[in-house]
Amino acid sequence: LAHASDKSISVSPNPFNDFTTFYIRNNNAQHCSFNLYDVTGKVVQRMSGITSTEFKLERGNLVNGIYFYSIYTSEKIIESGKLIIE
């Protein structure tokens, strides 16, 4: 089991209300993409061309509930996890 410190992504706050911030460690300025999925697996938000070490996810018109995300480069998925919007 990976320790939290081993993760290359941290998300704060989570659960969140209006927005949350993703912090990417060891990105080495790779272009990352981000997908947010609802519980049915449908993509409800996507971003691409992320090169910074942090980016913000705005709640927008997303309803309260559980969401899943994946952050990936052209080669591999860097991290995936769960978000909760309250």
Image (cartoon, helix red, strand yellow):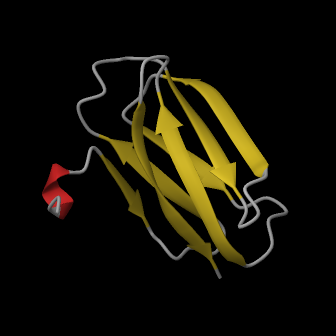
* Residue at x 74% of width, y 79% of height: 64
Front position in the image: 81 or 25:
81
Q: Picture coordinates of residue 62 (x, y %)?
A: 80, 65
Vertical comparison of 14 with 38: above or below: below
Vertical comparison of 24 with 36: above or below: above
* Residue 29 image-quadrant placement: top left
Left or right placement of residue 18 versus residue 31 in this view: right
Q: Picture coordinates of residue 37 (x, y %)?
A: 69, 54
* Residue at x 85% of width, y 63% of height: 61
* Residue 28 image-quadrant placement: top left
Vertical comparison of 40 with 86: above or below: above
Left or right placement of residue 78 versus residue 33 in this view: left
Image quarter hosting the C terminus: bottom right
Left or right placement of residue 53 versus residue 72 in this view: left
Q: Picture coordinates of residue 23 (x, y %)?
A: 36, 46
* Residue at x 64% of width, y 65% of height: 67
Left or right placement of residue 22 versus residue 62 in this view: left
Front position in the image: 4 or 41:
41
* Residue at x 15% of width, y 56% of height: 5
Q: Picture coordinates of residue 4 (x, y %)?
A: 20, 62
Q: Which residue extends farthest bottom?
A: 86
Q: Which residue extends farthest right?
A: 61
Image quarter hosting the N terminus: bottom left
Front position in the image: 22 or 77:
77
Q: Give the mark count.
A: 0
Front position in the image: 36 or 14:
36
